[in-house]
Image: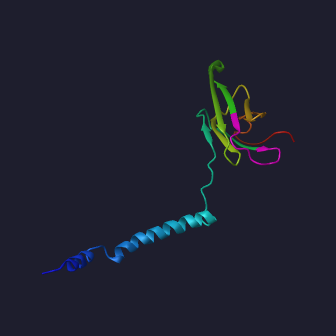
Amino acid sequence: MRNRTDSLAVGLRCWPKRQETRAGNRFTKLFFVFWFAVGLGIVPAVAADVPVVKGDLGPCSADFTVNDSAGKPLFDAKIQVTVVYGFMNKRKSEFEVGTNAEGKARIEGLPEKVKKLLEFRIRHRENSKSVIHDPAHDCHANFTVVLGAP
């Protein structure tokens, strides 16, 4: 007849073997090594995407880089444009986009032919500036805008 210690010893032999727990330990170690590498900058971080507004009115686009007077990029500077088009200029579309941490933004789908030049209004807090653009002369324009006192 078995005593209580023998049945306890038999029960302990049924627990998972050491090999089964090594896989979990390996995963945990890799997880911490990855986050340690991210913290040190060894693994590159995902680049900030450029905010894009699509107008679907034509093939043209406008890229913006907005900086302050010291040359630093401005985050969340608002860029607005109103596009008037169609028969007798009856149709109107308004677009607004904010810049990312690098001060960049993009407006796509602008019409190639406009009767009235496009006026982009850029503002950040109390500073604002306007940029006039004719897509017929430069369909894919790049603008660098400096806001603030020089």
Image quarter where the N terminus lies is: bottom left
Residue 33 is inside the magenta segment: no
- Is 101 left, or right, of 71 in this rendering? left
Residue name at image x 37 percent, y 72 percent: 21
Q: In the picture shown, does residue 34 fall above or below 147?
A: below
Point out residue 97 in the picture as x, y percentages from the top left corner: 65, 37
Q: State the residue in front, 17 or 95.
A: 17
The part of the image, by quadrant, that contains residue 89 is top right
Image quarter where the C terminus lies is: top right
- Is 19 left, or right, of 37 in this rendering? left
Residue name at image x 85 percent, y 39 percent: 149
Extreme left residue here? 1
Point out residue 58 in the picture as x, y percentages from the top left corner: 61, 34
Residue name at image x 77 percent, y 48 percent: 72
Look at the image and give the residue range highlighted in magenta: 67-79
Point out residue 125 in the picture as x, y percentages from the top left corner: 74, 35
Residue 75 is inside the magenta segment: yes
Q: State the residue in front, 82 or 32.
A: 32
The part of the image, by quadrant, that contains residue 104 is top right
Point out residue 59 in the picture as x, y percentages from the top left corner: 62, 38
- Is 24 left, or right, of 101 in this rendering? left
The structure's colour scheme is rainbow
Q: Main secondary structure of the magenta part?
A: loop
Extreme right residue here? 150
